[in-house]
Image: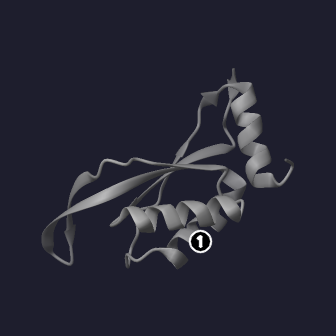
Amino acid sequence: MKGGGRNRVVLVTCGTLSEGRRLARHVVSAKAAACVNIILSPVESFYKWKGKLEKAREYLLVMKTTARKLAELEKEVKRLHSYEVPEFIALPVVAGSNEYLAWLQEGVEGLG
């Protein structure tokens, strides 16, 4: 197992499953992410928006990318997302299997 310092996991929520699938297909096809997992059971979100407490059913997308591709991924998510301010939270990958991290790199860097 090696360090994954240049890899990122990005969390994005969407209001509908079809929007999540459209985003996932686009960012993987564009090589902005190597993989997107969509949690098929909706999550219940509570948040304040414009001073009002809101509650929504959303779908969580877990995107895998590299630090180098992070800005491109964010740009595409913002461009295609229906929300005025979509969730976009990037977490560093501390470690992972050598084979998976190599595959992730190839998926977004165009080596494979």
Vertical position of residue 93 compared to residue 3: above or below? below
Q: Is residue 37 left or right of residue 46?
A: right
**Crowding near pointer 1: few (<14 within 10 Å), some, many (20+)?**
some
Q: Position of residue 108 (x, y in %)?
A: 74, 53
How many numbered dots are placed on residues in this image? 1
Residue 41 percent across, percent down from the top left: 31, 47
For residue 34, above or below residue 22: above
Q: How is the image coloured?
A: one colour
- Name the residue: 53% across, 66% down: 23
Residue at x 59%, y 32% (from the top left corner):
94
Observer-nearest residue: 112 or 53?
112
Q: Is residue 46 left or right of 22 when viewed as pictured?
A: left
Residue 4's spot in the image, x, y percent?
67, 34
Please state which amino acid type lies under the numbered disc 1. Glu
In the depicted structure, whether residue 11 falls above or below residue 75: above
Residue matched to label 1: 76
Helix, strand or loop at mark 1: helix
Q: Up-down: is 68 above or below 78? A: above
Residue 103 location in percent, x, y? Answer: 75, 39
Q: Quadrant of residue 100?
A: top right
Residue at (72%, 59%) from the top-left corner?
Answer: 31
- One can see residue 38 in this view: yes
Quarter-of-image position of residue 7: top right
In this rendered view, identify the residue nearer to me: 107 or 72.
107
Can residue 32 be seen at all in this image of the molecule? Answer: no
Quadrant in which the N terminus appears: top right
Q: Nearer the viewer, residue 7 or 109?
A: 109
Q: Is residue 45 left or right of residue 67?
A: left
